[in-house]
Image (cartoon, helix red, strand yellow):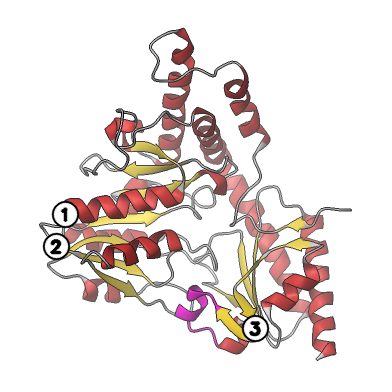
Amino acid sequence: MTKPIYLDYNATTPHAPEVIESMRPYFETEFGNPSSSHWYGIHPKQAIEKARSQISELIGCSPEEIIFTSGGTESNNHALKSIAESHIAKGNHIITSQIEHPAILEVCRFLENRGFTITYLPVDKTGIVNLSDVADAISSKTIMISIMHANNEVGTIQPIEEISALALSNDIIMHTDAAQSLGKIEIHVDSLGVGLMSIAGHKIYAPKGIGALYIRKDISLDIFCHGAKQERGLRAGTENVIGIVGLGKACEIAKLKISQNITHMKTMRDRFEKKLKSELSDILFNGHPEKRIPNTSNVSFLGLTANQLLKEISQDIAASAGAACNAGNVQISQVLKAMKIPEDWAKGTLRFSMGKMTTESEIDRAADIIVKTVNELRRRQ
């Protein structure tokens, strides 16, 4: 049986061959504890610091501003909870958006249960936060703004530079979740103006279970995990050397090939969307038409449900649903709800996300399958 065409790179990415090779010695011979002072600890320790430099070179910071985590979720938890706890004397107000990943929204709900006030900003029909809404939400008690860089469902890129400028002018710490944007567009933390930024390894062809948190030099965070003094004393525990090495290599590759990868992913996405537009009626592409990461296509098919579509194409294409139907009830994602996509459209939404390994033949075959499936389902109705 032929494997389905993989168009779910926003969910996770395959391991890049170079990443696998970079990790191999740490599975085999370089097994030492990086905290050990003897011979076996030297190379693992050096590998961790090399990876820290590789990440810092990709995002334009110093290596000392990077700490390793278990992934984007932990990075988000550390950033939000630490700032909330350490800045409570100044205020208890945090600003975020309605379309954040659960790794932000669930932390905010946790903090609400502990007395913090959270403002969940709306977005426009393309998924962009309005700067005037950010400005209006700021109060004397606002201690942090956390807005994702690019949305995982529709790909819309937020105006982080402008939001960060508002935060800075009001002495507020700015955090962004860059899990979906890193490696897909150019990122420089100084240009973005953020104080904290979360990174997830498995979104950029590195292993699952590894991530990083950028912490600007002037920001102090509380300890996230108590124990020994790894990661500047902020996160105790023997480091995941294999994962760290893989993340570092993935970032090195991303920096070297960023322009090439952007062009390739955009070409694949545009080819896919052009095919659907030319052969199907009653379809809607969600997200900003230009301010969007180059690999993401979020498509609504009028008159159908995501469940129907996924069931029909599951043997041929791997994609994600923007809505789920259970026992007659339609559950639309909070992103599509916030964008006010009408239910008749939203319930038939799928996300297709391409990667640097996606080929033209895969795109053409996937588009043909979707066109055929949509037409067949509509004929049955």
Element on which disc 1 rests: loop
Residue 197 is situated, as x and y percent measured from the top left of the image, at 37, 49
Residue at position x 76%, y 78% from top? Answer: 278
Check disc 1 and give the amino acid type: His
* Location of mark 1 (residue): 87
The quarter holding residue 318 reads bottom right
Magenta segment: 332-342
Image quadrant in which the C terminus is located: bottom right
Q: Are marks 2 and 1 in contact (CB under 8 Å)?
A: yes
| Residue at the (57%, 40%) spot, across then down | 206
Expressed as whole percent of the image width and height from the top left, the position of residue 287 reads 53, 72
Instruction: Tell me if residue 263 comes above or below residue 368 in the rendering.
Output: above
**CB under 8 Å between callouts 1 and 3?**
no
Q: Residue furthest right?
A: 1
Percent position of residue 112, x then y: 27, 68
Of the numbered discs 1 and 3, the one sitting upstream in the chain is 1
Q: Is residue 20 left or right of residue 313?
A: left
Query: Which amino acid is tagged 2?
Result: Gly
Q: Which mark is residue 91?
A: 2
Q: Is residue 57 magenta?
A: no
Q: Residue at 61% across / 89% down in the picture?
A: 344
Q: Amino acid at mark 3?
A: Ala
Mark closest to the chain's N terminus, 2 or 3 = 2
Between residues 298 and 106, which one lies in front from this camera angle?
106
Q: Which residue is mark 3?
A: 327
